[in-house]
Image (cartoon, helix red, strand yellow):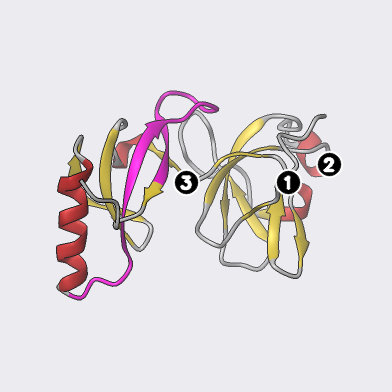
């Protein structure tokens, strides 16, 4: 199995990433070895939750990250086989638009094709005391079925 790249992609609790799973006893038993799968990184130290590409629901029980192509060093958990980050079930967001996220989640119906509108809204929310607010551009996942999306954080200091 070839690695995606030679870059360590670090993950944090709450992240959902697409990773090509390795060949462990665990993944072979579950019949997901060498497949691209969404994995939610859990708050339980060193645990991840496989998600169904078809439904977005949890598959099986949480499992140790080290059986799912992740390693750990002094900075935390990482993988060389992460293909996408910030993946989500599409029900919450609409692809090809900018969305306002608060604490890592889409904030209601705040979305637009224009970055400036969402940037201005995010800045107003910060002025009103919302600390963890950001704008993300949401795209359709390239690795999972069309009902999955991936998002990229866009810095708020970009000018018109």
Q: 37 or 126, which lies in front? A: 126
Mark number displayed over residue 86: 3
Label 3–label 2 contact, CB within 8 A: no
Kindly report the distance in space between the C-alpha atoms of the residues bearing marks 3 and 1: 18 Å
Mark number displayed over residue 52: none
- Which residue is label 1 attached to? 68
Q: Quadrant of the N terminus?
A: top right
- In the picture, measured across the screen, residue 141 lies left or right of residue 5, that is left
Is the residue 113 above or below the residue 142 in the image?
Answer: below
Label 1–label 2 contact, CB within 8 A: yes
The structure residue drawn at horizontal position 70% and vertical position 50%, both measured from the top left corner, is 8
Tag in front: 3 or 1? 3
Q: Is residue 132 magenta?
A: yes
Kindly report the distance in space between the C-alpha atoms of the residues bearing marks 1 and 2: 8 Å
> Residue 32 lies in what quarter of the image?
top right
Kindly report the distance in space between the C-alpha atoms of the residues bearing marks 3 and 2: 25 Å
Can residue 64 be seen in this snapshot? no
Q: Position of residue 107 (x, y in %)?
A: 24, 54
Q: Secondary structure at mark 3?
A: loop
Which mark is first along the chain, 1 or 3?
1
**Mark 1 closeness class: few <14, some 14–19, many ≥20 residues within 10 Å:** many
- Which residue is label 2 attached to? 24
Q: Is residue 140 magenta?
A: yes
């Amino acid at each position: 199995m070839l690695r995606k790249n030679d870059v360590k992609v670090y993950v944090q609790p709450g992240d959902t990433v697409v990773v090509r799973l390795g060949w462990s006893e665990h993944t072979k038993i579950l019949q997901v070895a060498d497949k691209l799968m969404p994995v939610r990184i859990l708050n339980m130290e060193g645990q991840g939750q496989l998600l169904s590409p078809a439904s977005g629901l949890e598959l099986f029980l949480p499992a140790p990250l080290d059986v799912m192509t992740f390693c750990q060093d002094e900075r935390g958990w990482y993988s060389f086989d992460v293909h996408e980050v910030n993946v989500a079930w599409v029900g919450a967001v609409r692809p090809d638009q900018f969305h306002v996220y608060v604490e890592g989640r889409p904030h209601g119906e705040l979305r637009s094709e224009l970055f400036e509108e969402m940037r201005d809204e995010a800045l107003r929310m910060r002025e009103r005391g919302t600390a963890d607010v950001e704008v993300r551009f949401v795209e359709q996942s390239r690795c999972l079925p069309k009902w999955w999306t991936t998002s990229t954080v866009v810095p708020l200091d970009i000018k018109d």
